[in-house]
């Protein structure tokens, strides 16, 4: 097992920019919508979803994987009323057949974000 992290992730993201590489499987910790280049978080739920997915894609690339290797995601939302907006962005990030997905509302997401996305990816 080894920890995977992106060199571009600012200290502000910390463990939220990491993954655990278990050989044939990679678990990517919840990706929060902080832009690694600026350390800032977008205002809208759509922009936050895009940034969380971009961070997810970056950490997968660091582990030698792509979004096509994702078999399961968990989307954490501060408000389930944001599900439709996040779902629209999510559908653009993955190709059919989409990975299995759970979506849950949680009391608090790190750094005051409205969305956090984690995944499990499998090497083919």
Image: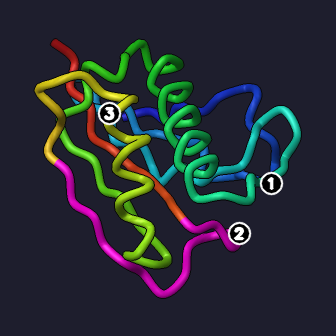
Residue at image location 20% in from the left, 51% down from the top: 101
The quadrant of the rendering that contains the C terminus is top left
Magenta includes 60?
no
Q: CA distance from mark 2 to mark 3?
A: 24 Å
Q: Is residue 45 left or right of residue 89?
A: right
Vertical placement of residue 110 versus 93, above or below: below
Q: Nearer the viewer, mark 2 or mark 3?
A: 2
Near mark 3 (Cα within 10 A), the count class, few <14, some 14-19 or many ≥20, is many
Q: CA distance from mark 3 to mark 1?
A: 23 Å
Q: Counting residues from the N terminus, which is met first, the one under dot 3 or under dot 1?
A: 1
Q: Are marks 1 and 2 in contact (CB under 8 Å)?
A: yes
Q: Are marks 2 and 3 in contact (CB under 8 Å)?
A: no
Vertical placement of residue 57 versus 32, above or below: above
Q: Position of residue 92 (x, y in %)?
A: 38, 30
Q: Is residue 35 left or right of residue 109?
A: right
Residue at image location 69% in from the left, 73% down from the top: 112
Magenta includes 105?
yes
Q: Which residue is mark 2?
A: 111
Q: Position of residue 115 (x, y in %)?
A: 52, 62
Q: Which residue is mark 3?
A: 26
Q: Is residue 77 left or right of residue 70?
A: right
Q: Which residue in the rendered view is the most extreme toward the bottom?
A: 107
Q: Counting residues from the N terminus, which is met first, the one under dot 1 or under dot 2?
A: 1
Q: Is residue 41 left or right of residue 70?
A: right
């Amino acid at each position: 097992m080894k920890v995977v992290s992106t060199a571009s992730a600012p200290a502000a993201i910390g463990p939220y920019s990491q993954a655990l590489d278990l050989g044939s499987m990679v678990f990517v910790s919840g990706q929060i919508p902080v832009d690694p280049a600026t350390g800032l978080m977008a205002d809208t739920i759509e922009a936050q979803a895009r940034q969380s997915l971009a961070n997810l894609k970056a950490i997968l690339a660091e582990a030698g994987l792509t979004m096509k290797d994702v078999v399961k995601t968990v989307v954490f939302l501060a408000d389930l009323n944001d599900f439709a907006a996040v779902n629209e962005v999510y559908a653009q990030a993955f190709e059919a057949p989409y990975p299995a997905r759970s979506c849950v509302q949680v009391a608090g997401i790190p750094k005051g974000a409205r969305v956090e996305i984690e995944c499990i990816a499998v090497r083919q």
